[in-house]
Image: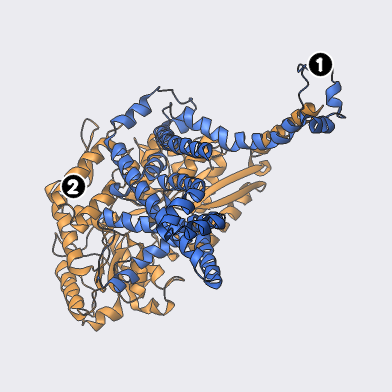
């Protein structure tokens, strides 16, 4: 008897569990379609443009009134681990936001649905930023829709620069070095003051110097094999220039990343740093000091190699992809279409990022430095295993070793190249 | 015992079932009562353990997750990769050294503080217990963050107190790991102290008095009477410390902003980065299995000693 009761209870529990799993299968099409659509966006969307997300769902529900859209906000640090786990459990989302440098690995492993045939349905498909559409393209096929972009520019405090006699943002490399020298002299008594906040664990602060000097991080040979090129003469020159700026302007922990740059600037201990517009807004955002809003400006990093003009900036950003195992790929595409409309792109720009198209730019004077960089941007090679290189932290560790002086630029890059080539050329 | 069981089980209709295979009619109620606990243990602990062991013999990466084909079994490939992986052995040695230092330091400090607590006035003891419990209640995530601030290069209080100027504690991993060790010891001392103090209160006072009358000094009393009395507790606390410190993760991970350089990695961090950063779930499972086996090897020595010390007393 007892056994039977337990067996019955177990059977009932199993039945409930199975039933709970299967209720996400939707049925029907168009206005009659019912079911759930799960969207994973990064938390930036929740903080910077929640209205655009709501508007997209509203627009989507005009077409599919009975489909319930659930937007789950994720953190950059662990969203891929969660995605792996969800996929393994068969409950992957129907739409996922991916960082541009994360795309290659998942495209190469067949994780995403091919959107090549649907490309023309999306807004601005003809004028997408090249760096973004490149990041979502693998073997000539499109696996993601450019979401928004972000470049880097120098963020500076007008009051601290003016205090040292600098009234115009530096337009040339020589002027920038001059400004760093003047600021350092002015604050000589304070060993914690950084004229230019530039820690080692920040690859998008360092890599542009490599590209500016005519180098690149890796290139693919005719045989398809990857060759890491941090150890090329151009890249070494670039990294030495980066290190020289650090030596001249940065007085802080060289092993850290850029995430405390904004708070250091708020504290008046940093005059300039090189980062995204999101980090710039943090200076006067809720974690910063609202009073500083008028004291913050941006300018494009001047080019050290060219002597005049600006440094070509790294274009980061996000794409929206549809996992191949999603059962609702049509719904997912419709939601993405609604979410990447012109109105949404305007919201992303207002939120401080770059649109996925060059036709929508901000008129905000504070963003001038970022708009100026749009003329020339680059992205990392779309190698299947590049995300792996990022995850291994090979580049970050190399940069920290250079920054702390633990290794020379030549030694650090030679070791990193070797490790990166092994990773990039692994099957 | 048996009468009690029969009294409990006797009236149940279970006994009258004719189709029962169990001729001996063992009482079933105890098994039924313990069944939920066992079921939960199997579901929560056993299932993941079995999965990890199976995974460790498979090639399981992104390609397997996103294809419908089931992951291929690769035999001992993951394990042979560990043995030929130079990084693994470096990490293992680092982990063993760190564990030894952390356990010894936290035990010595913990026991000394417990001995101190025995001597001080009641109100001081109360204050000490309160502080220890408070420190114990702080999640390691928070305490590590606070230590990170205190050791910050430009604005940290440690450099200010020591007059080190702008010393960077993390450029050299030996110094950085020293800070991590301090945090671990700081976090472990409350448990060790409170437990040891509890054991100290159980030391028979008449023995201590008798020894003192016989002219034994403080040191002699400690080694001849106190230490043997609290030895079982110390052994258990040491064993637990080894388990905890061997798998230290949070302190180093947070101290290094989630990007521990290669010379900061312990076994737990190495296994985690292999699995979650490198998406190599099969290989990472093998590393985890090896970690558990290593820990078991260490523990066997301790458990045996524990059993022996029970026998001799």
Q: Are marks 2 and 1 in contact (CB under 8 Å)?
A: no
Q: Is residue B97 left or right of residue A45?
A: left
Label 2 secondary element: helix
Camera-nearest residue between A393 and A134: A393
Chain B colour is blue
- Residue B310 drawn at (x, y percent): 53, 39
**Residue A107 appears in which quarter of the rendering?**
top left
Q: Which residue is mark 1?
A: B19
At 69% from the left and 36% from the top, the residue drawn is: B36
Residue A277 seen by the camera: no
At 37% from the left and 35% from the top, the residue drawn is: A108
At 40% from the left and 22% from the top, the residue drawn is: B75
Chain A colour is orange
- Residue B53 drawn at (x, y percent): 47, 29
Q: Is B6 located above or below residue A334 in the figure?
A: above
Picture quarter with the N terminus of chain A:
top right
Host chain of mark 2: A
Number of numbered discs on residues: 2
Q: Is residue B140 left or right of residue A89?
A: left
| Measured Cα–Cα span from mark 2 to mark 1 | 76 Å
Camera-nearest residue between A312 and A417: A417
**Residue B74 appears in which quarter of the rendering?**
top left
Q: Which mark is residue A413?
A: 2
Label 1 secondary element: loop
**Residue A208 appears in which quarter of the rendering?**
bottom left
- Residue A88 drawn at (x, y percent): 51, 35
Host chain of mark 1: B
At 33% from the left and 32% from the top, the residue drawn is: B82
């Amino acid at each position: 008897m007892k056994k039977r009761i337990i067996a019955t209870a177990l059977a009932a529990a199993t039945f409930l569990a199975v039933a709970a799993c299967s209720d996400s299968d939707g049925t029907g099409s168009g206005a009659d379609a019912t079911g759930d659509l799960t969207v994973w966006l990064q938390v930036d969307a929740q903080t910077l443009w929640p209205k655009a997300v709501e508007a997209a769902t509203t627009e989507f529900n005009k077409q599919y009134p009975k489909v319930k859209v659930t937007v789950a906000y994720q953190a950059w640090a662990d969203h891929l681990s969660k995605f792996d786990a969800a996929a393994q459990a068969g409950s992957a989302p129907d739409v996922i936001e991916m960082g541009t440098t994360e795309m290659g690995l998942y495209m190469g492993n067949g994780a995403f649905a091919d959107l090549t045939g649907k490309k023309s349905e999306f807004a601005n498909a003809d004028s997408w930023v090249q760096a973004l559409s490149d990041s979502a393209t693998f073997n000539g096929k499109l696996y993601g829709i450019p979401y928004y972009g972000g470049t880097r520019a120098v963020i500076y405090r007008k009051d601290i620069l003016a205090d040292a006699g600098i009234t115009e943002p530096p337009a040339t490399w020589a002027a920038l070095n001059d400004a760093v020298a003047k600021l350092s002299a002015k604050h000589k008594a304070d060993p914690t003051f950084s004229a230019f906040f530039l820690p080692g664990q920040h690859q998008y602060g360092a890599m542009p110097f490599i590209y500016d000097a005519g180098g690149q991080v890796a290139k693919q040979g005719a045989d398809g094999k990857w060759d890491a090129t941090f150890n090329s003469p151009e890249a070494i020159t670039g990294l030495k220039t980066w290190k020289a700026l650090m030596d001249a302007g940065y007085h802080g922990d060289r092993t850290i990343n850029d995430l405390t740059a904004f708070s250091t600037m708020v504290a008046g201990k940093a005059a300039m740093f090189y980062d995204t517009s999101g980090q710039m807004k943090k200076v006067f955002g809720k974690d910063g000091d609202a009073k500083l809003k008028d004291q913050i400006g941006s300018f494009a990093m001047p080019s050290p190699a060219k002597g005049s003009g600006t440094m070509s900036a790294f274009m980061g950003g996000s794409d929206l992809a549809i996992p191949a195992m999603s059962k609702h790929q049509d719904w997912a595409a419709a939601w993405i279409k609604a979410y990447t409309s012109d109105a949404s792109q305007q919201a992303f720009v207002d939120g401080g990022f770059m649109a996925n198209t060059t036709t929508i730019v901000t008129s905000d004077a504070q963003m001038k430095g970022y708009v100026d960089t749009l003329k020339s941007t680059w992205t990392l090679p779309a190698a299947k295993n590049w995300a792996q290189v990022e995850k291994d932290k090979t580049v970050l560790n190399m940069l920290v070793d250079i920054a702390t002086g633990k290794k020379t630029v030549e030694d650090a890059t030679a070791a990193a190249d070797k490790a990166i080539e092994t990773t990039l050329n692994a099957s | 015992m048996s009468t009690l069981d029969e009294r409990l089980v006797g009236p149940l209709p279970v006994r009258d079932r004719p189709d029962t295979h169990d001729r001996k009619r063992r009482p079933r109620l105890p098994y039924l009562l313990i069944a939920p606990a066992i079921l939960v243990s199997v579901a929560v602990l056993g299932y993941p353990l079995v999965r990890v062991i199976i995974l460790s013999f498979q090639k399981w990466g992104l390609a397997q997750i996103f294809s419908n084909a089931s992951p291929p079994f690769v035999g001992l490939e993951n394990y042979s990769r560990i043995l030929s992986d130079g990084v693994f052995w470096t990490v293992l040695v680092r982990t063993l050294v760190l564990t030894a230092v952390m356990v010894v330091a936290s035990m010595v400090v913990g026991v000394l503080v417990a001995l101190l607590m025995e001597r001080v006035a009641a109100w001081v003891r109360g204050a000490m217990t309160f502080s220890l419990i408070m420190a114990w209640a702080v999640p390691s995530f928070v305490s590590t963050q606070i230590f990170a601030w205190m050791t910050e290069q430009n604005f940290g209080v440690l450099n200010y107190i020591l007059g080190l100027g702008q010393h960077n504690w993390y450029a050299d991993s030996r110094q950085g790991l020293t800070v991590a060790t301090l945090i671990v010891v700081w976090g472990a001392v409350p448990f060790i102290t409170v437990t040891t103090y509890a054991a100290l209160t159980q030391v028979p006072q008449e023995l201590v008095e008798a020894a003192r009358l016989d002219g034994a000094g403080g040191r002699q009393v400690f080694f001849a009477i106190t230490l043997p009395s609290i030895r079982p507790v110390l052994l258990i606390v040491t064993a637990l410390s080894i388990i905890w410190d061997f798998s230290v993760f949070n302190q180093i991970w947070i101290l290094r902003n989630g990007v521990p350089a290669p010379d900061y990695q312990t076994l737990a961090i190495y296994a985690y980065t292999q699995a979650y950063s490198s998406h190599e779930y099969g290989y990472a499972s093998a590393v985890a299995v090896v970690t558990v086996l290593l820990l078991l090897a260490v523990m066997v020595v301790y458990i045996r000693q524990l059993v022996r010390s029970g026998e001799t007393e």
